[in-house]
């Protein structure tokens, strides 16, 4: 990035980061480099790995553009990529943990992360305990002599509890523990993970960075303390995303701030509209007081995105819900979020929570607000609510 003498704005950063035009005949974007073999000119060069690039798994210009851009954006010491967000969670955990360690994970964690702890980490002698995501300094009571790492995800998947990150990272520093945060919802634009003391920060680039539901990608950024461990683990496993996906992530990055601004505006408007619906009991949106941990969001975040949940009044059955959801014409049912299209899914975490009881008192739905016209989105949901409560009023 060129320095102009005054602090550079986020839009300017996103426009400039990771660009390598001089190395590519002036073309604005770093090309898609596909490659395994890199050729050396002499035996001496080969033996001494004397070349800017040495082999496909050791980095390409496309991968390095994305990694260096993300490192600058997150104010980290370094970034490692992964072929998916879940892969990035695994990479971060494997960088921090060793056999015999104890790991603390919030009960509100993304469900596949819970499966990863049970199905993979446990096999390598790493024990996981779950904690109430609303615990801050109180987490100290759960630390054992072999606790090495605290995982955070704020807000939590589906249920949106916002965590007291500074309290937890302060505690971790006192006990010399590593902290990893899954920062996917906020992205580095709305929550500065390393600035709040987290050692490793995970982003599912599949979501807002890609922005169009057409790539899978994960990123892990590390502060100076954890970067050597992250880099070693990354290089040992060589689980890299495809070049095409990296190029699409770089393209998504150029408009990330604009799309997030829209996601925030639309998310807030739809959440406020939903709060006014008679069928809705609670809105679980971090920017709303009704969201557990809202005060932490107000203190620590610089924005909100377009994904949140609602709790329906305890009048409705699964059959009512099917009547509401099946005929929706704009909102569609599907996993993931952060794309241009609106999504809605029911969820129920009662069966797998272990540290806290999740009793919302009604059926729950998660919404991702896309870029369609808000009047159309409201009309779609309004008709859905009428089908939901047909015969109930
Ligand atoms: C989607 C998501 C992931 C996983 O990302 P994938 O690319 O789908 O594997 C991880 N964490 C959170 C919070 C997510 O929402």
Image: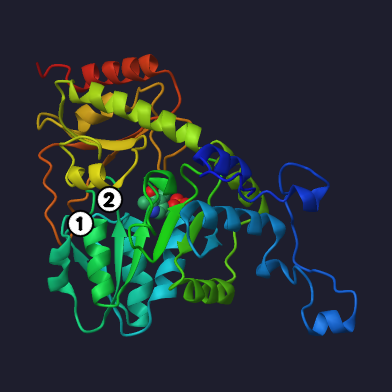
Q: Residue at x 41, y 60 (%)?
A: 201
Instruction: Relative to 274, say whether 293 is above or below.
Output: below
Classify mark 2: residues with Cα within 10 Å, few (<14), some (14-19) or many (20+): many
Q: In this orientation, does residue 159 appear?
A: no
- Which structural element holds mark 1? loop
In the rendered image, which residue does mark 1 sit on? Answer: 133
Residues at badges 1 and 2 in contact (C-beta under 8 Å)? yes
Query: Where residue 79 sits in the image (x, y, percent)?
Result: 53, 62
- Which structural element holds mark 2? loop
* Corner quadrant of residue 27: top right
Give me the disc on residue 156. 2
* Corner quadrant of residue 354: bottom left
Position of 392 compared to 115: left or right?
Answer: left
Q: Residue furthest right?
A: 42
Classify mark 1: residues with Cα within 10 Å, few (<14), some (14-19) or many (20+): many
Instruction: Relative to 20, say whether 213 is above or below.
Output: above
* Colour setup of the view: rainbow
Position of 228 compared to 323: left or right?
Answer: right
Instruction: Relative to 249, say whether 104 is above or below.
Output: below
Q: In this orientation, does residue 52 appear?
A: yes
Query: Where residue 393 sits in the image (x, y, percent)?
Result: 9, 16
Q: Residue at x 59, y 57 (%)?
A: 68
Give me the disc on residue 331. none
Q: Residue at x 27, y 30 (%)?
A: 322
Query: Where residue 274 sits in the image (x, y, percent)?
Result: 23, 24
**Disc nearer the start of the sequence (1/2):** 1
Instruction: Relative to 273, say whether 333 is above or below.
Output: below
């Amino acid at each position: 990035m060129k320095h102009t003498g005054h602090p550079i704005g986020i839009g300017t950063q996103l426009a400039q980061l990771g660009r390598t035009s001089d190395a590519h005949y002036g073309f604005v974007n770093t090309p898609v480099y596909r490659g395994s073999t890199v050729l050396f000119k002499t035996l001496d060069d080969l033996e001494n790995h004397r070349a800017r690039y040495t082999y496909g798994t050791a980095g390409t210009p496309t991968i390095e553009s994305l990694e260096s851009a993300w490192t600058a954006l997150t104010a980290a010491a370094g970034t490692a990529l992964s072929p998916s967000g879940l892969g990035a969670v695994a990479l971060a955990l494997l960088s921090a943990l060793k056999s015999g360690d104890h790991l603390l994970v919030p009960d509100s964690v993304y469900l596949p992360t819970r499966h990863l702890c049970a199905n993979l980490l446990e096999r390598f002698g790493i024990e996981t305990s779950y904690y109430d995501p609303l615990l801050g300094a109180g987490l100290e009571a759960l630390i054992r002599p072999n606790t090495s790492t605290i995982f955070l995800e704020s807000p939590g998947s589906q249920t949106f509890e916002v965590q007291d990150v500074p309290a937890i990272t302060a505690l971790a520093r006192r006990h010399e523990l590593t902290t990893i945060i899954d920062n996917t919802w906020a992205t580095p634009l709305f929550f500065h993970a390393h600035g709040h003391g987290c050692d490793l920060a995970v982003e599912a680039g599949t979501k807002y960075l890609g922005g169009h539901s057409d790539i899978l990608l994960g990123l892990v950024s590390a502060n100076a303390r954890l970067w050597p461990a992250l880099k070693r683990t990354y290089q040992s496993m060589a689980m890299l995303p495809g070049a095409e996906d990296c190029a699409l992530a770089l393209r998504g990055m150029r408009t990330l701030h604009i799309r997030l601004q829209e996601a925030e505006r639309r998310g807030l408007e739809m959440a406020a509209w939903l709060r006014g619906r008679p069928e809705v009991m609670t809105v679980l949106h971090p920017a709303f007081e009704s969201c557990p941990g809202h005060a932490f969001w107000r203190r620590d975040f610089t924005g909100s995105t377009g994904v949140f949940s609602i709790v329906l009044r305890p009048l409705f059955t699964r059959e009512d819900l099917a009547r509401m959801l099946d005929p929706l014409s704009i909102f569609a049912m599907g996993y993931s979020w952060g794309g241009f299209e609106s999504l809605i899914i029911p969820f129920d975490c009662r069966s797998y929570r272990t540290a806290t009881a999740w009793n919302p008192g009604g059926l729950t739905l998660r919404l991702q607000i896309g870029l369609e016209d808000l009047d159309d989105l409201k009309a779609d949901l309004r008709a859905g609510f009428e089908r939901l409560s047909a015969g109930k009023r």
